[in-house]
Image (cartoon, helix red, strand yellow):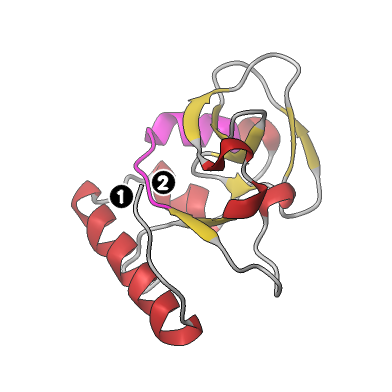
Amino acid sequence: METGQPLHAFVFDKLADGRIVVREATAGEQLEAINHTTYKLTPGMCVIADAEKPVALGGVMGGVDTEITATTTNVLIETAEFAPLSIRNTARSLSLFSDSSFRFERGIDPHGLDITSRRCCELILELAGGELSTG
């Protein structure tokens, strides 16, 4: 929270095709969030998805399937700007409120995205070691 910009980390090795996309949920999709509650998603909700399924509710909460653990070695860091009204509607519809949804509902500084991504990577390299990839 050093920059005030929410971000999310995914276990890279658990992402189908090793990538994420931002899209709307489709009817019938579900997500087990990191609070271990399964949510039924509805069209119009913003999700972060891999090639197969939603892995996070954009701007609200990540999913348990790609949650970082003590054995995680490869991570994908996501920083983004989401539409405040979309985040508010999703959080209220699901009664799922988080620090992330609180900040995104009020709007974030889009100019801080790059700074936040870079600082997060610096801290990971400094504290955990490893190497940085782009893509």
46 to 8, vertically: above or below? above
What residue lies at 65% left-to-right and 63% top-to-bottom?
A: 68
Residue at the far bottom: name it: 127
3D distance between C-alphas at marks 1 and 2: 6 Å
Question: In which quadrant of the rendered view does residue 11 lie?
Answer: bottom right
Dot 2 crowding, Cα within 10 Å, few <14, some 14–19, many 20+ = many
Dot 2: element:
helix
- What mark, if any, has residue 108 been given in the picture? 1
What residue lies at 49% left-to-right and 44% top-to-bottom?
A: 59
67 to 120, vertically: above or below? above
- What mark, if any, has residue 120 been given in the picture? none
Looking at the image, how many numbered discs can be counted on the residues?
2
Q: Nearer the viewer, residue 106 or 120?
A: 120
Residue position for label 2: 104
Residue type indicated by callout 2: Phe
Instruction: Name the side, left or right, on which 58 lies relative to 65.
Output: left
Q: Position of residue 6 (x, y in %)?
A: 42, 57
The part of the chain drawn in magenta is 78-91
Q: Position of residue 87 (x, y in %)?
A: 49, 36
Q: Nearer the viewer, residue 7 or 118?
A: 118
28 to 2, vertically: above or below? above
Residue type indicated by callout 1: Ile
Question: In which quadrant of the rendered view does residue 54 lie?
Answer: top right
What residue lies at 60% left-to-right and 48% top-to-bottom?
A: 61
Q: Nearer the viewer, residue 67 or 132?
A: 132
Screen quadrant of the N terminus: bottom left
Magenta residue check for 68: no
Dot 1: element:
loop
Q: Position of residue 15 (x, y in %)?
A: 62, 44
